[in-house]
Amino acid sequence: MHIVAHSMGGLVVRSCLVNWGEQFPFINDFVSISTPWGGQNSAELGVEYSPVIIPAWKDLEPDGNFIKSLYQKKLPESVQSYLFFGYKGNRNPFSTNNDKVVSLASELDQRAQKDAEMVFGFNEDHMSILSSDQVMRQFNTIIDYNAENAMIQQLSGKLQIYFEFDSPDDLIKPRPRLLLRSTEYLNNEHIIYLRNKDSGKVLGPFPVGKYKVSLIADAFYPEPVSLLIDIKPDTVTTLSFKLNPRGSLLGRIINANEPQIQPFINRESNRNIKIKKITLSGNNIHRIIYPDKHDADQNKFDNYLSGTDCLIDACFYFYKLPAGVYTLTINAKGFKTFTAKYDVIPGQTYKTNTIELVPISEN
């Protein structure tokens, strides 16, 4: 038996498997899709403030008893778990993202990842992930491969990825992400979250075909930038990357006067703020981003790989910065000019800074 569950269904299935799964040795695979493994902060707010409490809200509290109970036991050894998630939400993929319903942080809760054979990310939102041809191809490849049907297994292949960081051993290294793009199917893009110990590990199965592959890691850039590969039937394809340190400055822009409904999570960038320009100066660097030249149609991964500065959905990205102190200035219609200094260190895992713009008083 193979079980696939979407959203909260994943929580229900895991609860069943950790408590009674050993009684069902015929369950081979469990694929969760867009599941809030870390709970939902909005449910916590509902429990705290709503005059009428829906029982399911208590189960979705991040620190509630139900969420904690899911990880008190491991999944049965007979069950192979695969975690699918979407990152096409309201924020960028390099910060606290979401799929328009569930936060990326919850979808990728480390406790759930620990039991997963592999973690697959897709450029889909919470609902579109269910009708994605790409998701179905990957799902069917996993199910068919694990069915131990020799003929079906030859329709898939595996990857062996070697990577190393050009940085001191004592420096905290980010988690790499494998970016896999089909060259045969339009808009076919997904990412696979790796662990640093996965270098040299054989990963898969993946649908056969030709792909453009890159490796992404915060505050680093890959060498080579990308590789063209052909995943062949019943074959392990080997590839290698070196990750070099790179200085970066990222930020999301919000309105300081907007109410913060969820004070314990990062606030959304405000796409309605009309930004005139963003300037970065320092260390013989002077760059300006104009919004009319940078729009949401750009692919964030392409900008990361090319090191191109950009502004997307009120989130800005400056890449290829030498070490040093920089002055950031933001000019936006109806807001006071924002100025602040930031220390950039190449290879130091970056954070996305939250920039609060103060409206100009009409009085």
Image (cartoon, rainbow, N blue to C red):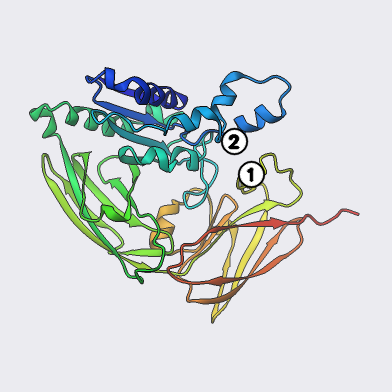
Amino acid found under the numbered disc labelled 2: Asn
> Pointer 2 and pointer 1: residues touching (CB < 8 Å)?
yes
Identify the residue at image location x=28%, y=58%: 226
Query: Measured along the vertical axis of the image, is residue 65 above or below residue 265?
Result: above
Q: Nearer the viewer, residue 171 or 163?
A: 171
Considering depth in this image, is 177 or 233 the residue closer to the camera? 177
Label 2 Cα neighbours within 10 Å, binned few <14 / some 14-19 / many ≥20? many
Q: Residue at x 50, y 63 (%)?
A: 309
Q: Foreground: 57 or 6? A: 57
Residue in the image at 24% along x and 28% along y: 140
* Residue 235 seen in the current view: yes
Q: Quadrant of residue 56?
A: top right
Q: Which mark is residue 41?
A: 2
| Horizontal side, residue 114 vs residue 47: left or right | left
Relative to the observer, which residue lies in front, 279 or 42? 42
Q: Quadrant of the C terminus?
A: bottom right
Label placed on residue 69:
none
Say which quadrant the N terminus sits in: top left
Mark 1, residue position: 264
Identify the residue shown where x is 25% and y is 42%.
184
Q: Amino acid at mark 1?
A: Phe
Q: For the view shown, which residue lies furthest in the left direction?
A: 150
